[in-house]
Amino acid sequence: MKLLVIEDEVKLAEYIRRGLQEEGYVVDLAHNGIDGLHLAMESDYDLIVLDGMLPGIDGLGLLAALRQSKRTPVVMLTARVKVEDRVRGLQSGADDYLVKPFAFSELAARIQALLRRTKGPSEPEPVRLLQVHDLELDLIGRKATRCGQKLQLTVQEFGLLSLLMRHEGQVLSRTEIAAQVWDMNFDSNTNVIDAAVRRLRSKVDEPFHRPLIHTVRGMGYVLEARDE
């Protein structure tokens, strides 16, 4: 599915785009209201993530113009926390409303829920099970097993393993891992990523004969089943 993110904070916009791409969406970006409205009107998007405070045309102005001819689902993002601000956004045509700062997981869940409501039950089901060699990750049941043995993972370890398995065979940098698994303001220059991968290895790899998580010197980490 194709989404449009209209957000003037460049770092936040890139963070949202990377996260949504990880979820399998095709994502276009606009950093001001004028460009955002042009893209929204000229292209067909399945959903728009719209910041409330934008240069050029603000979020409510853009939404009003969009609603004159299009019913594209819109999730509004805003730093305004008052109830009347949320009511105003919804009354202006937004389909959902999320206050900054927010967890990416909540944004992703709201997008999925809104797409389910607007697209109906014919859309394909999301991925439920990831498998690499003898390692399995049940995304719905939140369970990890290897060689049939249950792995006891923390919430953070589960998220890290999920990211690595979704990108089987693809090297992920520490910055990418930090942005996807930790909060957006996480300082990726610390050794937190290395320590987290070390703990994950102690559960996923060390008890078993064949390692799956590999270090790529100077680049990051990759999960894959290599030839012995």
Image (cartoon, rainbow, N blue to C red):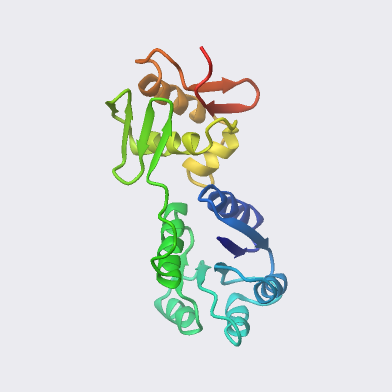
**Residue shown at 65% from the left, 73% from the top:** 40
Residue 134: horizontal and vertical position, in percent?
A: 38, 25
Q: Quadrant of residue 115?
A: bottom left
Left or right, 187 with respect to 146, comes to right
**Observer-nearest of 73 and 202:** 73
Report the label total.
Answer: 0
Quadrant in which the N terminus appears? bottom right
Residue 210 screen position, x and y as percent: 43, 15
Q: Residue at x 61, y 81 (%)?
A: 66
Q: Looking at the image, which is closer to me, 92 or 41?
A: 41
Residue at 44% of width from left, 76% of height from top? Answer: 86
Residue at 54 percent across and 50 percent down: it is 19
**Is 168 above or below relative to 50?**
above
- Above/below status of 125 relative to 136: below
82 vs 22, nearest the viewer: 22
Which residue is at the far front? 122
Q: Specify whether 21 is left or right of 150.
A: right
Q: Position of residue 227 (x, y in %)?
A: 53, 16
Q: Which residue is outermost to the bottom? A: 68
**141 relative to 87 in the view: left or right:** left
Q: Position of residue 12 (x, y in %)?
A: 59, 55
Residue 148: quarter of image: top left
